[in-house]
Image (tube, grey):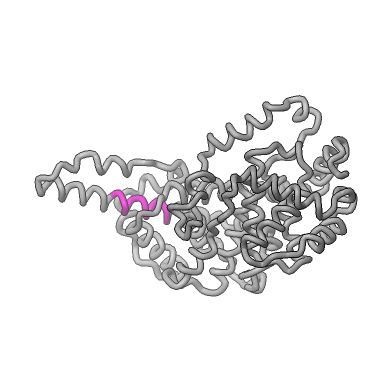
Amino acid sequence: MAANYWESTQRKHWQFTKDELAAIRQRLDDEDPGLVQMFPLPPLRHLNIYFNQQINRLGKRLGVRQQAMATTQVYLKRFYTRTAIRQTNPYLVITTALYLACKMEECPQHIRLLTQEARSLWPSDLHGHDAGRVGECEFSLISEMRSQLIVHQPYRSLLALQDEFGLAQDETSLAWTVINDHYMTDLPLLHPPHVIALTAVLLALVLRPSSNSAGGSGSSGNSNANAGAAAAAAAAGAGGVAMAASALAQAQAQAQAQAHAKAAAMVAAGGGGGSQGSSQQQQASFFQGGSQGEGTAATEPKKATDPRLAKVQRFAAWLADSNIDIEAMVDCTQELISFYECHEQYNDKHTREQISRFIKARNLDK
């Protein structure tokens, strides 16, 4: 077991690039193209939303903690990088992943109770399954994940950082909701948990609704039900998105200025720090909408009178002084905003029917 993310199997074996993830999924589709053609599935994001909802429905029935439900979603994503969705009964996999996650997160559920609740929740798709099938599927899950079951979550980083950035309760609750929502994207397989947590903090600062709409009870279980509220906040917050882009551009500009100053000091002192400054030259397309012309203004921002803007500037200054990968934060921000836009096109009935179709046609419900 690695108590440290940097030494963990999560970082060494379960962090991919977008290209690697796309290649893995394409390889799974290529194994049986006839099956892919016969049973088309909704877009992956819609599947992720649907699976997230089912995990939360089952978890709520059993009183499962949010951390265990988050681990369930990571297990599901890992398993489906090794096995094609159409080869499985997703409801059985969800049930088993939740059972395994509860054991790993030290809030175990009895296998018979879990199976009974799952069968009552999805009677037409799980009617032939009993506790023995869940036990068999558990071995399959553990095998496909190569017994690498420790999952580092962004929640701990968020709680550690809330005092650092002076987050109010509603900001912490919104950041928590954004972290919950990120499990409906590929981000858990793409970026470290601390980067996700920092992105959630930034979005909470810039997308916070002006009035207290959903009472801030979201710190634990059911805040995935608030995905629609977060989506609405994101959709309404075009100015907030611009503010997020500006904050990240400012942080990157300050980091570059500091790197150049350090390199110049080394050269002046007779050191050979030549190429060090060039390593800071990654330019994210996210910035190019408005911050490129700001150049020097980004390194010395005007003092903010608006408290929210002051927090965002403080956050950007902290980022500039840290070693956080700002490019990764840009990618996370883009992915989450894109997800919230996609959420509006999600059709629950259509997704459920397409899943049930291949389950019944392939007798995976028996």
Query: In the rendered image of this protein, does residue 225 appear above or below residue 274?
Result: below
Residue 243 visible, this angle: no
Q: Residue at x 15, y 48 (%)?
A: 266
- Horizontal and vertical percent for residue 315? 41, 63
Q: Residue at x 55, y 59 (%)?
A: 153
Viewer-side residue, 346 vs 146: 146
Is residue 253 rendered magenta in the image? Answer: yes
Judge whether residue 291 can be spotted in this image.
Answer: yes
Q: Tell me: residue 48, above or below residue 300.
A: above
Question: What span is colored magenta in the figure?
Answer: 247-256
- Camera-side residue: 112 or 228? 112
| Residue 149 at x, y percent in the picture | 59, 53
Q: Is residue 252 magenta?
A: yes
Quick one: quadrant of the C terminus? top right
Q: Nearer the viewer, residue 329 or 359?
A: 359
Tell me the chief SS of the magenta region.
helix
Q: Quadrant of residue 82?
A: top right
Residue 317 on image: x %, y %: 35, 61
Would residue 229 appear left or right of 263 to someone viewing this image? Answer: right
**Residue at the spot 69% in from the left edge and 65% down from the top edge:** 108
For image coordinates 48% across by 57% down, the residue present is 2
Relative horizontal placement of residue 208, taking residue 57 as reference (left or right)? left
Instruction: Return the x and y of residue 217 as percentages of the image width and height.
Output: 65, 73
Number of marks present in the image shown? 0
